[in-house]
Image (spheres, coloured by chain):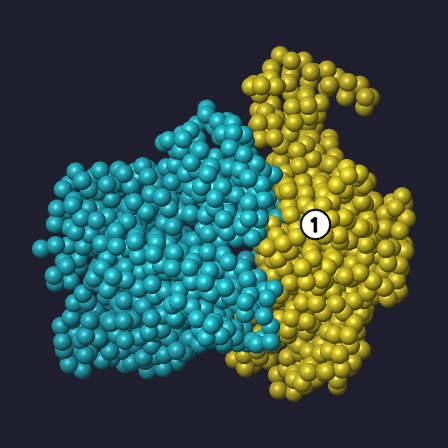
Chain colours: A yellow, B cyan
Amino acid sequence: MVDPISVEVIRAALHAAAEEMKICMLKTTYSPILNEARDFGCAIFDTEGQMIAEAVGLPLFQGHLGWPVLATIRDRGWEDIHPGDIFIHNDPYDGGGNHLNDVVMFAPCFAGDEPFGFVVTKAHWVDVGGSVPGSMAVDTTEFYQEGLRLQSLKLFQRGAENRDVWRVITANIRTETGVMKDIRAMIATCHTGRRRLQELIERYGAATLQESCQIIMTQSERRTRKALAALPDGTYQAQGWLDNDGIDLDKPLRIAVTITISGSDMQVDLSACEPQVQGPFNCGDAITISACRFVLKCFTTPHDPNDEGCFRPLQVTLPPGLIVSAQAPASVSRYFTPLLLLIELMFRALAPALRETITAANYGDHMPTIVYGLRPDSQTPFIHADLNAGGNGARVDGDGESALIIMAASAVRNTPIEVSETKYPFVHYTRYGLRQDSGGAGTYRGGLGILREWMYGTAVAGTFTLERSVTPPWGLDGGHTGDINDLTITDADGNSRQVRKGTRVPIQAGSVVRIQTGGGGGYGDPLARQVESVQTDVLDGYCSLESAREQYGVVLDADTLTIDMPQTTALRRTRCASQNGGTR
Amino acid sequence: MTTRVGIDIGGTFTDLVAMDEATGAIRFSKVATVPQDLVAGMTDALERGAVDLAATPLVLHGTTVAINAILEGKGARTALITTEGFRDVLQIGRGDYPELYNHLVRKPEPLVPRHLRLEVTERISARGEVRTALEVEPARRVIRQLDDAGVEAIAVCFLHAYVNPVHELEVARLLHEIYPEALLSLSHQISREWREYERTSTTVMNATIQPIVQRYLHAFDDYLQAHQFAGTLLIMQSSGGLMPVARALRRPVTMIESGPAAGAIATGLLGQAVGAERLISFDMGGTTAKTCLVQQGLPHVSPEYVVNGHVMRVPVIDIVEVSAGGGSIAWVDNGGSLHVGPQSAGADPGPVCYDRGGTAPTVTDANLLLGRMDPHHFLGGEMPLQRPRAEVAVHEQVAQPLGLDLMAASAGILRLAQVKMAHAIRAITIEQGMDPRDFTLVAYGGAGPLHAIALARELAIPRVLIPLQPAHFSAWGMLCADLRHDFVRTTPGLLEQIDLATTNAIFVEMMQEGETLLRREGIPDARMTLSRSIDLRYMGQEHTVSVPVDVAPLTPEEAVRLRRRFDATHQATYSYAAPEVEVEMVNLRLTALGHLQPPHLAPWPQGTLQPPAMAYRGTRPVYFESCQQLVDCPVYRRDGLQAGNELVGPALVEEGATVTVVYPSDRLVVSPYGLLDISVHG
């Protein structure tokens, strides 16, 4: 029996090893989407694919990194897994769950001849082949159009590079994007993790480590169960709609979730979700379960270390063939969109049980803008991509946060304008600010979205995907909806067009691309918002004078912004009366 | 007789150290900090320390005034002027969640409210060309909006001003013309690096603390003048270097973290005295433990720092801090795991054994139960420790829930605290590609010597040094600092295509600025050190590695050598190099040091191999984990030991509230300066 002190020492050492992998990724990768936007995760697993430690990273990735490992063990058998091997895997339907760009790389660790576990990292490759640079089209209907599918391939065999695999990769992806250098960084990360884990095995012995891991997971399970048991038993439901699948732009898609909490168990039933769709808004089951794990973690033990034990009380009912459990050859390049809605719906469903911690809806999607073309000077290809922040929903006791990138990608960051303009001197930004009036009105206001405007000095093409450009972020408890997302391209001649979802959208030199992201939903009746808060919002330009009057019933002097109390009281009284009349 | 005086205002205490310049004799005094009136607390310290200001040529000063203003949200009312279309950069930041699984987390409140963030029409391109000229009349109208805003400070940050500051300077002229009294912070003068959010945040931080720091420094200066002080007042920066008051008044953002730096500086000086070039400083107090890498006498400096979520791009001593101090509380969670910290019993109520109302078991209580501290000799016997109370607390709250006996539970508390500290040291060594076996650990702070050797054993550090008066070592460190000015310029481009003329011109400009400042501060050329470096990275990477430039002016051959040094550093740090990949330059850096006369280390009374009898206090039972039992352990008084004395562990050396724990078979030698110099066998 390992003593409890050693267990804690080992827990700290395992998390430090995962954290060191993360630092290695951050410091050695080449693509801004990895080192600036941090679209990657790192974790350590045992031989049964159970996560024993993770680094602070992209949470959606980390909840399911065990599946690619399990898929590989299943495919290859332990007899084909050796010290010095490094595997890569991105199968969306078996173990991956997300788009082909998200490639898992992992290395087995051994104690003598006995397998001990795996160090795993998953990162977004800026290109993985397929029909468009960046591999993230919005009009694909089969994964074949989206790039290379890698199933448990050995990048290294017993420490030696498997040149044939390299040749296939280099011949089929757009290497000018720098992705090969990122692969080097991922390898360095696996080496770092393996070295650290190997040191721990030597120091403590495999048996002690394994036993400690079991105890660590049991403790996490116990903590999670205690948090679950504190919630009222019951069945909680919510449903919402995705805008469309990118092919049929007028057909909304249903995401529905039923959560049952009984005792210290949580069951999530997703069988009522839309069947898998033609366009690339499908995902595989592994990442869907990961999303459920993420939500469970958030409302049970957000401040404690994360490992497989945290997930044991969770059971997910997920029949195959749904938009969130797609089967080959469903296209998946925008796999995250249904998940982002699913996560919010799970919170919404749980609102009666978790009132204090549930917010109104967010802007919904980080909507990567991916623009590509040839550099005007050298005529070499480039990809200019960024993520977009938006508004958070208001909460029971406060306004929503403004300009945050979506929660499920919580460590990712935007790219500085000064960096973008230096790397791509033909890009010119003209505005980057908060979007007035975009937050849903409420006793507590939704956070504001952003407005970003830029142009290119050369003709380019872009791939865009806007979610919640039809269905707005919901409010709660009488709070209003937030603004929807919008992307408009205005040409030099003044013609403008809205883009909801589009692949290879042509953009002329000098055209202005403007994205306006949505705000969060409001919480509570706007007429109950403190008049002074409305006044401050107008002073700071979060809210316009008109909206103060229309949404909040607050009348301010246009020049001095002083409150006209008699008019405000009268206006609010009238509004209140008509509201009550309306609901009767 | 002249004295050099250092005063460090910390959160709880104000430390004063006065050194006789001729003999090196040191006096310490400590008074409680007066948070509402820092100057009052400080004058109290000066009076108690019986400092004759008329005979003091140099007062060196570290203070929490700047960081307090930020932590307490009491910055001055500040306006920000930005490029049209970009006033919200400060609020949008990088869009990332500060915490992973906390959807209710709050971003930091911007230090300038939105209605005080104004935009003017102007635009500079990434190459530094004027893309849109500054429109003067409209700009003037925009500025006049501040007429009745009650603003005390104004920050200006334009896009790409780090390449070409012409518009920032033009707006500064307008601002001066309209508000001659206004305090201005121009981004290119505060942080000449790219990344608009980080630069804006740094500039705003400077602006918002500037009026407060100015009032404070003026009040302090008035006091000094009133007491016939005719010397120089120097202010400690976060970088560990000193600056004159005039510069502190303009760049207060550089003094945000001026406290913890001093211990690392002192470590450097100590290392030079004993001929150890590579050191790890380890400072453990009541609430946290801090560690820093010190090489060739200089602490490692990082280019960025975050306070309350606000980012600052200014050099700061790269200190890794973990919540593990003497007062850190041990507790068992509902899953059955033991934790130490982050909560701390602090000094009030303090550990259970202080018997001042504390009920939660702490690291200090565990030390007491294991026999490592003497209940009767703590603080020279002034404050007897209550062992029975500590026993009950550890038994009920740790031992029983975990099913351990009292000794194992107490040892477990220490082990966990030590693991946290060991991870902090790993982060500054192993994770940076350095091997702790090449280093000497210098331990100080009240609790540092109790844990230093356990840490050294854990990390295979072969040598530990314990300075005299470890609890005052940080304060002494202020006397060891030099004048320092840091300069940086972002000049993105490929190293292979480096424009030597431009690069050298920028280096010369920074050098001249540094030399001019130091000359003005009275430093002769012979006492200046100017060091240049370039931040390099493989094309496309985000993170840079700062590589020293050995030759000035830079030559094509040196550029090639730079490249090789970069590959080698990258290999050593991150286990791979990519000699085939192009290397990108990001920043040019120059550090100008003006060396002050370092303090004397006074020689310690010389003895023989055998410690004198008066140093021996007898034995007491002490628990060593390696022996898994209580061992009869000899105890010595530090003030009785003489230079040349040797001890072999197990042994305890007591000094005031501090105990050095020497483990079985470790060898301790008292150095000529009275340091405890321990060879760790591990």
Direction from residue A22 to residue A494 in the image, left or right: right
Question: What chain does badge 1 belong to?
Answer: A
Q: Quadrant of the C terminus of chain B?
A: bottom left
> What is the x, y in percent for residue B366?
39, 63
Q: Is residue B379 above or below residue B121?
A: below
Q: Which residue ends up furthest to the left in the rendered image?
A: B1
Query: Of all residues shown, which one is farthest toward the front?
Result: B501
Quadrant of res A185: bottom right
Residue B251: % across, % down: 37, 46
**Residue A559 visible somewhere in the drawing:** yes
- In the image: residue B209, left or right of residue A245: left
- The residue closer to the viewer here, B235 or B276, is B235
Please tell me whether residue B298 is drawn above or below residue A272 in the rendered image.
below
The relative height of residue A536 versus residue A416 in the rendered view (above or below) is above
Image-based side of A246 in relation to A462, left or right: right
Q: Residue A289 versus residue B10: which sits nearer the camera?
A: B10
Residue ID at (22%, 80%):
B646
Q: Going 21% across and 39% down the picture, which residue do you hit? A: B223
**Secondary structure of the residue carrying numbered label 1:** strand
Q: Quadrant of the N terminus of chain B?
A: bottom left
The x, y position of residue B233, in whole percent, is 24, 48
Residue at image mark 1 = A456
Q: Is residue B137 left or right of residue B212?
A: right
Q: Label 1: how many residues lie within 10 Å, few (<14), some (14-19) or many (20+)?
A: many
Residue B409 visible at all: no
Image coordinates for residue A352, horizontal then vertical, percent = 72, 40
Three-letter amino acid code of the residue under disc 1: Tyr
Total numbered labels placed on residues in the image: 1
Q: Residue at x 64, y 79 (%)?
A: A109
Of all residues shown, which one is farthest toward the bottom? Answer: A113
Q: Residue at x 69, y 57 (%)?
A: A376
